[in-house]
Image: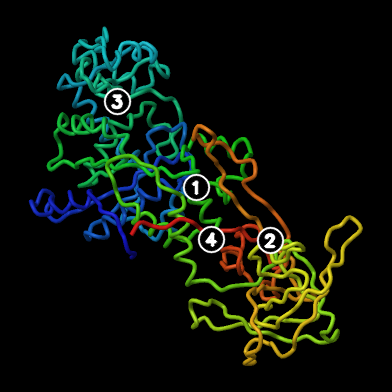
């Protein structure tokens, strides 16, 4: 897809497995989100990795919801997850739920009890934590650890039947309380939760823990390579223990961990993002400032750019932080040959061309995209009164300023040379208008070969200009003096701008380059036939240079 694609150690592992025939010719992956919030750009990396891996090897990738906690799940999140996966360009082989396997998981838990590998514990959550020990000190065995198999089977059945309250009892794996890996110190594998489940209703009041459920789900589905983020590396011994002790599947799936995406100026904690939504700091999960996939989609990012970004950063085993400039570079690279340019004026200053006929309007021709001549040209009106950008005029110009200032001549893009002769001000000292003259012989395309000018500025015709609302976004988070991310109080600037008349045809979700300003998208929620609202996707300039 692009140059400079980083290496992928996971694909190297799969290549070796295919050589040895470990799973035959199968490569099955899965993307297993918990439906307790909207997915973010970090999840996009996992989506791209799992689905593109399956595509590369002619395998399949399932979308499986980790719905083992009935308290947190919501169908709103399910719908958003599926929209995100589709938007990124992928389609799952099967849509599955962890809860589809609750019966099988219960059987597996009973199997562990029968083999003396699990027991019902009546310690409280606080006591279990206290008994667990520390990284330097071994844990202490639960007084319920050596109950008989018969007693454990009876208690577990009673847990299932609803005899006990939430937290009153748990089922724990019987492994090693002195293990240097804290996850292996008799972890809880079932807990009581008297909550109705969106998929199974009130059938169950006990639910498996993720570390117990996940390997069983993978094994049932025939997943070959269970790809997850690095924080699960210490959980892999438990993943393997569960499958080995149950012993129902051969060959067993293997868990492979990779570094999660950390991005500068970005927080990717579901809990923190949910708080921003709940506290109305942002306008919902799809606020264009949010790093959620819904947010970046509304912001105007393209799936092609996100996939390119995920390929460029590669798949590493060690955690690191990626510059957000690389993501923005990928967006510019994708959009620069896709979208049409439009003349849009921010912070407008009126220009009156005093020697231009008052009743005359003509059309000037502009390129739709200077990098793609095949996109053709468009015509926009030009008359005696224009708007130019405030950034294109300085009353007292600095050194090497080549745009408009008193006495200076510039080209108006696609039209004529104009010279500023007078600055007319309001009573408060602000600029009311600039009085200029034009040279009729200098029209673009006329073959004029006289004097040269160093500056070219763009414009919109004042009589036909369309007022639009633009929202220029800055980073939602900025680092403080310690490098920690803090909320940016100036993360969005809303203003009214003036656009060329063709902007009236913009449809929600349509992207453009606003000449010399940046790439913008007509907001999908707010743009109507009568009101146009544009989000800045990314500005045009960047100091970021991808590594060669």
SS for callout 3: strand
Instruction: Compute the Cα span from label 3 to label 2.
Output: 70 Å
The mark closer to the camera, 3 or 2, is 2
SS for callout 2: loop
The mark closer to the camera, 2 or 4, is 2
Residue marked by disc 4: 541
Picture residue at 51% right of the left edge, 56% below the top: 297
The circle on residue 292 is: 1
Picture residue at 31% right of the left edge, 52% below the top: 314
Instruction: Compute the Cα span from label 4 to label 1.
Output: 24 Å
The mark closer to the camera, 3 or 1, is 1
Q: Earlier in the sequence, mark 2 or mark 4?
A: 2
Residue marked by disc 3: 189
SS for callout 1: loop
The mark tally for this picture is 4
Picture residue at 68% right of the left edge, 81% below the top: 380
Instruction: Compute the Cα span from label 2 to label 4.
Output: 21 Å
Label 4 environment density (alpha carbons within 10 Å; few <14, some 14–19, many ≥20): few
Residue occupying the far bottom of the picture: 447
The spot of residue 400 in percent (x, y) is: 63, 65
Q: Earlier in the sequence, mark 3 or mark 1?
A: 3
């Amino acid at each position: 897809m692009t140059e400079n694609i980083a290496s992928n150690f996971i694909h190297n592992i799969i290549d070796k497995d295919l050589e040895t025939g470990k799973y035959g010719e199968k490569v099955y992956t899965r993307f297993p989100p918990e439906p307790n919030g909207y997915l973010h750009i970090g999840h996009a990396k996992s989506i791209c990795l799992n689905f593109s891996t399956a595509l590369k090897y002619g395998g399949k990738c399932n979308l499986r919801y980790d719905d083992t906690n009935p308290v947190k799940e919501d169908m709103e999140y399910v719908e958003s997850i599926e929209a995100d996966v589709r938007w990124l360009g992928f389609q799952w082989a099967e849509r599955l739920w962890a809860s589809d396997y609750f019966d099988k998981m219960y059987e597996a838990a009973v199997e562990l009890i029968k083999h003396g590998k699990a027991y019902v514990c009546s310690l409280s959550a606080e006591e279990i934590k206290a008994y667990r020990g520390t990284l330097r000190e071994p844990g202490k065995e639960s007084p319920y650890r050596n109950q008989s198999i018969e007693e454990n089977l009876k208690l577990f059945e009673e847990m299932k039947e609803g005899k006990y309250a939430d937290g009153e009892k748990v089922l724990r794996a019987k492994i090693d309380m002195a293990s240097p890996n804290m996850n292996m110190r008799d972890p809880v594998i079932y807990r009581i939760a008297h909550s109705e489940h969106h998929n199974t209703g009130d059938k169950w009041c006990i639910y498996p823990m993720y570390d117990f459920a996940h390997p069983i789900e993978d094994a049932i589905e025939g997943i070959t390579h269970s790809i997850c983020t690095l924080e699960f590396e210490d959980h892999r011994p438990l993943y393997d223990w569960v499958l080995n002790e149950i012993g129902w599947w051969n060959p067993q799936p293997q868990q492979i961990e990779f570094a999660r995406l950390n991005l500068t100026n970005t927080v990717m904690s579901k809990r923190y993002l949910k708080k921003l939504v709940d506290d109305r700091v942002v306008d919902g999960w799809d606020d264009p400032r949010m790093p959620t996939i819904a947010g970046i989609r509304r912001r105007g990012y393209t799936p092609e750019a996100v996939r390119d970004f995920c390929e460029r950063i590669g798949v590493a085993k060690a955690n690191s932080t990626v510059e957000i400039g690389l993501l923005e570079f990928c967006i510019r690279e994708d959009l620069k040959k896709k979208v049409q340019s439009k003349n849009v004026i921010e912070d407008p200053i009126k220009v009156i061309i005093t020697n231009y006929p008052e009743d005359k309007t003509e059309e000037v021709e502009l390129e739709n995209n200077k990098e793609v001549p095949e996109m053709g040209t468009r015509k926009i009106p030009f008359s005696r009164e224009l708007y130019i950008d405030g950034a294109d005029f300085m009353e007292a110009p600095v050194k090497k300023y080549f745009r408009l200032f008193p006495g200076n001549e510039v080209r108006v893009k696609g039209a004529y040379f104009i010279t500023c002769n007078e600055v007319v001000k309001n009573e408060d000292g602000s600029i009311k208008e600039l009085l200029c003259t034009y040279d009729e012989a200098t029209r673009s395309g006329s073959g004029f070969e006289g004097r040269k000018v160093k500056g070219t500025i763009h414009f919109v015709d004042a009589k036909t200009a369309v007022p639009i609302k633009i929202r220029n976004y800055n980073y939602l988070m900025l680092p403080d003096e310690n490098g920690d991310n803090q909320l940016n109080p100036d993360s969005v600037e809303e203003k009214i701008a003036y656009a060329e008349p063709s902007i009236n045809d913009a449809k929600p979700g349509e992207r453009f380059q606003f000449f010399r300003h940046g790439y913008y998208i007509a907001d999908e929620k707010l743009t109507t036939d009568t009101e146009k609202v544009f989000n800045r996707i990314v500005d045009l300039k960047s100091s970021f240079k991808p590594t060669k």
